[in-house]
Amino acid sequence: MEEVRATAAWVASRASHVVVDSAGIEKVVDTIGDSIPKVEWDFEGIHYFDNGPLTVQYLFVLDALNFCFWPDKDLSYDHLALGLKEALEKDKSAFDADRLQKYTGPQLRELLKWPRPLPLEDERLRLLHEVGHELERSFNGKASNLVKSCGKSAGKLVALVARHFPGFRDHSVYKGHQVFLYKRAQIFAADLWGAFKGQGYGEFHDIGSVTIFADYIVPAVLRQLGVLKYSSALMNTIEANNEIVSGTEEEVELRACSVYAVEKMRELMSRKLGKQVLSVELDLWLWSCGIQSPSLRHHRTLSIYY
């Protein structure tokens, strides 16, 4: 995850469309005060949890499909999480590796009880098949074996996921420089930590190394809080609901500057409070603020990474 931090800082220092406002960071940290607002991982009650390997399998499938909901205004992350949960409660073999390799579009829609084609449905199927194939090939069909092989290191888990599953390799090229963000690979580690409350499959000695998960909600919340400032051209694009193409300078800056800004928030809070503050906790707080703000205007990018 040091690659994520370093390359996000590199982008932030050269960005022209998005600016990280130091005064805005200080204001937010002062407002938060002595403790981060605690948000429970499953505060909406939408996730499957049985305290065992099946939960790990569920979370890996969930995070493989956790991207790009906005093209369908009625679809959200909640539909995905709850739909997969109910499918697994009905059929405990629904996410077996051999079955993951065979799902079709209509079958995936039926699984989620969704009445029409999903955004980027072909890509979702491709990633589902990839997960099933590689789990079967390298981990005896089980995501729990993938987690066991990381030696309780979130950093190693993210690296393993990115190495074995190409669909999780979330990086871009910005001004000739490789930028790493790894949103879905990192959120898998964070979901395990949150679901298992830092125990068992969720025990990581380096959970503090995980950054925030650069998506389309967190940048919008950071802008609302005065932490990020956008150029007028970028703001006009977002206000008009125009698509920002994946890999463009604007899109990379939105995501990388969000990572950098929250790292600066975390460092300042850690100094003020005299204890470790986790980016994972800050991300959950920011994301929960975002999904509870219906008027929030976010950027729109077609991407398999978020």
Image (cartoon, helix red, strand yellow):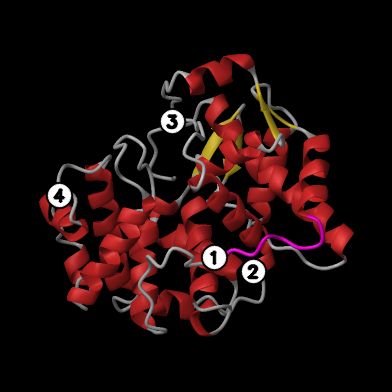
Give percent across and percent down for residue 146. Answer: 43, 74
Q: Are marks 3 and 1 in contact (CB under 8 Å)?
A: no
Q: Are marks 2 and 1 in contact (CB under 8 Å)?
A: yes
Split into 4 quadrants, where in the image is the C terminus?
Answer: top left
Q: CA distance from mark 4 to mark 2?
A: 35 Å
* Residue 34 falls inside the magenta stretch: yes
Q: In screen coordinates, is 87 left or right of 162? A: left
Q: What span is in magenta?
A: 33-39
Give percent across and percent down for residue 295. Answer: 49, 34
The answer to which of 187 and 299 lies nearer the viewer is 299
- Quadrant of res 57: bottom left
| Label 3 Cα neighbours within 10 Å, binned few <14 / some 14-19 / many ≥20 | many
Q: Which residue is mark 4?
A: 105
Q: Is residue 197 above or below residue 19?
A: below
Q: CA distance from mark 2 to mark 1?
A: 8 Å
Q: CA distance from mark 3 to mark 2?
A: 30 Å
Give percent across and percent down for residue 226. Answer: 71, 34
Split into 4 quadrants, where in the image is the N terminus?
Answer: bottom right
Where residue 207 is drawn, which disc sits there? Answer: 2
Mark 2 belongs to which amino acid?
Ile
Where residue 190 is drawn, which disc sits there? Answer: 1
* Residue 103 falls inside the magenta stretch: no
Q: Which residue is mark 3?
A: 300
Mark 1 belongs to which amino acid?
Ala
- Tell me the element at label 3: loop
Q: Residue at x 71, y 60 (%)?
A: 36
Q: Is residue 175 above or below residue 199?
A: above
